[in-house]
Amino acid sequence: MEAGDVVAVTSGPAYRDQYASSGQGGDSVRGAARGIEQKPWWKRVVKVGIGARAFAYLVLAYIVARIAMGALGEQSTSNPASGQGVAKAVAQQSGGHVAVFLLGVGLLLYAAFCVVDALLHHDEKKQAKKWWKRALSAYTAVLYGAFGVYCILTAFSDTSRKTSGEQGRKQTQWTARVLDWPAGQVWLFIAGVALFVAAAVLVVRAAKRKFRKYLEEGRMSPRVHQVAMTVGVIGMLGRAAFYSVIGWFIVKAALEDDPKNGKGFDGSARALAGNDGGATFLWLMAAALACFGVYLVFEAIYRKVAGTSTR
């Protein structure tokens, strides 16, 4: 959670007739998804889901900035730089349990959008490309669905229990289990390389501004369009840096056969903060992640919906 342009005729009767006559409309699941996508309220559902995603990224940027502040001698945060940390940080505020509940609902709506996208879109001619993009949409749906459920559970739980250290230990234990597998170092190395590949894809997407096709650019004034493009590019680069940091420490854990290096992003960010220039790097990453959150606000307002795909 990623390509596709608007197909204006997807909601018209002529398209439905063509769709049914093509033999593809017999699938009840896809038929149900098509019906949902054609509902007048679906566009609002999608925009609320994207808005929830924007809020999550803005909170994540705040947590990363707090970690950078800790490296400079200021007050840091015990909340991990992760989805769990985002939920906890929101819940700790005044009225936060209500806010984190609403965040969870919004993320579930975004997950629903990803499910519909996986079922209906990505009809590329190349089968491998088509199924890869559908699988990516399905993975995004699972990821944000789990995040949404976690937020809702957090709204009804004690937010003082989970800390960054506890999450870091769990991630280290996960890395240790992988290293214990047959050829565990190889599998861990592949996982790290995959994150570098994901980062490279995001860099290419930023350079080519591929996210433009998700926006109704005709509705945007020149200034709004320029701001959206700028924060979109910076935000994509921030996400690339995010994946690269995790990938680097996972690869390091694989090469050194040391699970302590596989700490996920939170542990990696805190390790970076203690190095020369680490705090500056984290400040830049926090700013870039905040830019991506701002870009998602623009996307929530100007997103093309019918016939589009998730990222």
Image (cartoon, grey):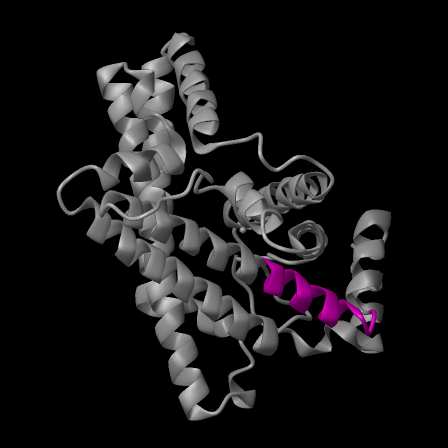
* Range of magenta residues: 39-52
Residue at point 44%, 84% (across, down) = 225
Count of numbered tags: 0
Question: Where, by quadrant of the figure, is residue 124 drawn?
Answer: bottom right
- For the view shown, which residue lies furthest in the bottom direction? 221
Furthest-left residue in view? 276
Is 296 on the left or on the right of 257, as rendered?
right
Q: Quadrant of residue 238?
A: bottom left
Residue 168 appears at what percent x and percent y?
42, 27
Q: Is residue 81 left or right of residue 104?
A: left
- Give the image location of residue 246, x and y in percent: 34, 37
x 32%, y 58%: residue = 237
Is residue 25 something one can see in this rendering? no
Magenta residues, dominant SS class: helix
Query: Quick one: 251 or 271, which is closer to the camera?
Result: 271
Q: Is residue 29 above or below residue 222?
A: above
